Amino acid sequence: MKLTRIGVDVAKNVFQLHGVDRSGNTVWKRRLSRGKWIQAIVDVASTDCVIGIEACGGAHHWARTLMARGYAVRLLAPQFVKPYVKSNKNDANDAEAICEAMSRPGMRFVTVKSTEQQDLLAPPRVRSGWLRERTALINRLRGLVMEYGLVAPQSPFALKQAIPDWLEDADNGLSDRFRSVLHGLWQDLLQLDRRIQSMDKQLAAIAAADPVMNRLQQLRGIGPLTATAFWATVGTASQFGKGKQLAASLGLTPKQHSSGNKDRLLGISKWGDTYLRTLLIHGARAVLSQAKRRDDPLSRWVTDLANAKHPNVAAVALANKTARIAWAMLHNDMNYDPALASMALT
């Protein structure tokens, strides 16, 4: 029995394996526990056997584990595996679908992330969670004080300043019990702010110490947070042949619904990393807000586009352009050149 490909459906505790020979015939199937499946592959497959894993939770860890043992590993996006699932969805059919999908000549694979990249991805994602918690807490505060006839200011900064005044005002109708609850929520809000500020300083220090991240920050709309997430997600961008492929992988290019000679472009696909795409678009919005007061080619281009189309369209187009320029900088190991960037706008 000579295995050439093995598809692995990973889970928390139970792993389904599906192996085929050179002719594509199924010759090996196993359902094994978390602690046994790696050794099972080592026992039956030589290092010239290619292992396929769906890019889900834990996939990068298992890919690095197999690569350390000499195997070539292919990570597949779930949407590219789904068309190959036969009949009902179960672990065995999923493993077979992974094994079949990885054999397609035109299949696109997910680059395995290093531990360093995942270390860099963790702080921004924790920070993003804290921001969501802070927004939820602020909305909770607004709803609670409104029941007592108090209207919270619109900005979070003004709200944090208003809460101490509410607590000290003895004539605003707040009971002692509610004042205690309000004080606790205020302290939670301040604690979240301190955590976010501490994380911002940590990410700024990380970005300042790395030459690649420093180079990315030469681009308008990319700060320490975006530069860190960009490098951690994309790496050297060597897996992309050109900048357009990188922008498409981030979901910044339009979907198509075309037939015959009728080409129809829809909204952006929103594929790929949601977090990085969001950061790029927010950075583009910041650039767009300042563009009217500047007279460089990039500002004129994005301002004209916002006037002709819509500010949201212009922001996404600028985010797309930023991703493509970032690819060129990484691919050619060069600094940002405004002259070359202006040529790309024509």
Image (cartoon, rainbow, N blue to C red):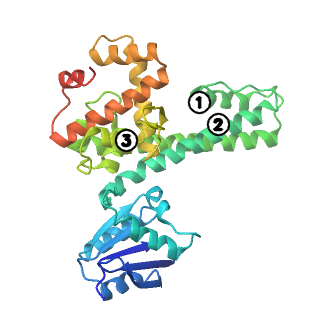
Who is closer to the viewer here, 159 or 129? 129
Q: Which residue is tagged 3?
A: 248
CA distance for labels 2 and 3: 35 Å
Numbered badge on residue 138 = 2
CA distance for labels 1 and 3: 35 Å
Quarter of the image where one finds residue 285: top left
Quarter of the image where one finds residue 303: top left
| Earlier sequence position, callout 1 versus callout 2 | 2
Circle 1 residues within 10 Å: few <14, some 14–19, many ≥20 = some
Residue flagged by tag 1: what amino acid is it?
A: Pro
Residue at the (25%, 41%) spot, across then down: 242
Nearer to us of marks 2 and 3 is 3
Residue flagged by tag 2: what amino acid is it?
A: Ile
* SS at mark 3 in the image: helix
Up-down relation of residue 283 to residue 229 (above or below): above
| Earlier sequence position, callout 2 versus callout 3 | 2
Residue at the (27%, 36%) spot, across then down: 326
Residue 181 image position (x, y, % from top left): 74, 43
Residue 12 in view here: no
Residue at the (46%, 38%) spot, across then down: 259
Q: Which residue is tagged 1?
A: 156
Residue 103 image position (x, y, % from top left): 34, 66
Residue 145 in view here: yes
Who is closer to the viewer here, 234 or 170? 234
Nearer to us of marks 1 and 3 is 3
CA distance for labels 1 and 2: 7 Å
